[in-house]
Amino acid sequence: DQQVKQNSPSLSVQEGRISILNCDYTNSMFDYFLWYKKYPAEGPTFLISISSIKDKNEDGRFTVFLNKSAKHLSLHIVPSQPGDSAVYFCAASAGNNFNKFYFGSGTKLNVKP
Amino acid sequence: DARVTQTPRHKVTEMGQEVTMRCQPILGHNTVFWYRQTMMQGLELLAYFRNRAPLDDSGMPKDRFSAEMPDATLATLKIQPSEPRDSAVYFCASGLLQPGQGAGAGELFFGEGSRLTVL
């Protein structure tokens, strides 16, 4: 039973437009959320995180929004660039569970030039 | 340049053979994870160590998989006997994580993965 779900396997966006990747979770004990980016033949790399005490965290072109009541988070990329084309994984952990990290199934983003 | 190192990068073997994957976590990190990437499940947690002690291996098929940390610089994942359904990319990740602190709990650093093909 997946506790972190990414229901969109893929997303295609035009360069310069906004990319919105979504993630839902079921465990209300999760208090730390992360996004990872993965290129082919490489390991995932950390992109941005947010703790449950916040509802928004911004880092350059990347912004993560957290809606705790809906158990939903999203990653916004503005403006999208072709180099952003990758698989994006959402992850969550609960501090009281020794930081066990659960990952979603990933969303493949394609940014078209 | 600190990084998580995994070996082998690629492994092709026949069903029934033993497979051992190795991981060198980043020096000083106290937590090591093993994940398996599949098309359907994404990144599936297999095992998890803190300060070399196994905390959770509930994601592993117990009859054929085993994970150990013989010392702080080496984590191993062994499959015996291997089966075609084990074919996947296996990732090791390490982090410096503090228990009970969700906020700013830190991040995981992943290796490049070991691609396993069992024929």
Image (cartoon, helix red, strand yellow):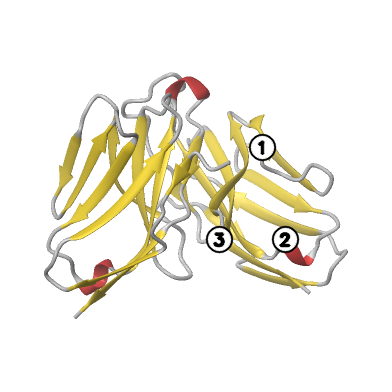
Q: Tell me which numbered mark, 2 or 3, is placed earlier along the sequence.
A: 2
Residue in the foreground of this view, choosing between A71 and A94: A71
Q: How many marks?
A: 3
Q: Position of residue A11 (x, y in %)?
A: 31, 66
> Is residue A40 at all visible to an observer of this figure?
yes
Q: Say which residue appears at 51% left-offset and 24% top-offset.
A: A97
Q: Quadrant of the N terminus of chain B?
A: bottom left
Q: CA distance from mark 2 to mark 3?
A: 14 Å
From what the image shows, is residue A26 above or below residue B19?
Answer: above
Q: Amino acid at mark 1?
A: Asp
Please state the chain letter of the residue tagged with numbered disc 1 in the rendered image.
Answer: B
Would residue A74 appear left or right of A18 to someone viewing this image? right
| Mark 2–mark 3 CB contact (< 8 Å) | no
From what the image shows, is residue B119 above or below residue A3?
Answer: below
Q: Tell me which numbered mark, 1 or 2, is placed earlier along the sequence.
A: 1
Could you say which disc has been placed on residue A29 in the image? none
Q: Position of residue B32 (x, y in %)?
A: 56, 39
Residue in the foreground of this view, choosing between A71 and A87: A71
Q: Tell me which numbered mark, 3 or 1, is placed earlier along the sequence.
A: 1
Which residue is label 1 attached to?
A: B71
Looking at this rendering, what residue extends furthest in the bottom direction? Answer: A113
Q: CA distance from mark 1 to mark 2?
A: 26 Å
Q: On the same chain: label 1 and label 2?
A: yes
Q: Amino acid at mark 3?
A: Gly
Could you say which disc has been placed on residue B113 in the image? 3
Which residue is label 2 attached to?
A: B86
Disc 2 on helix, strand or loop? helix
Q: Amino acid at mark 2?
A: Asp
Residue B7 picture quarter: bottom right
Please state the chain letter of the residue tagged with numbered disc 3 in the rendered image.
Answer: B
Would residue A50 appear left or right of B9 to someone viewing this image? left
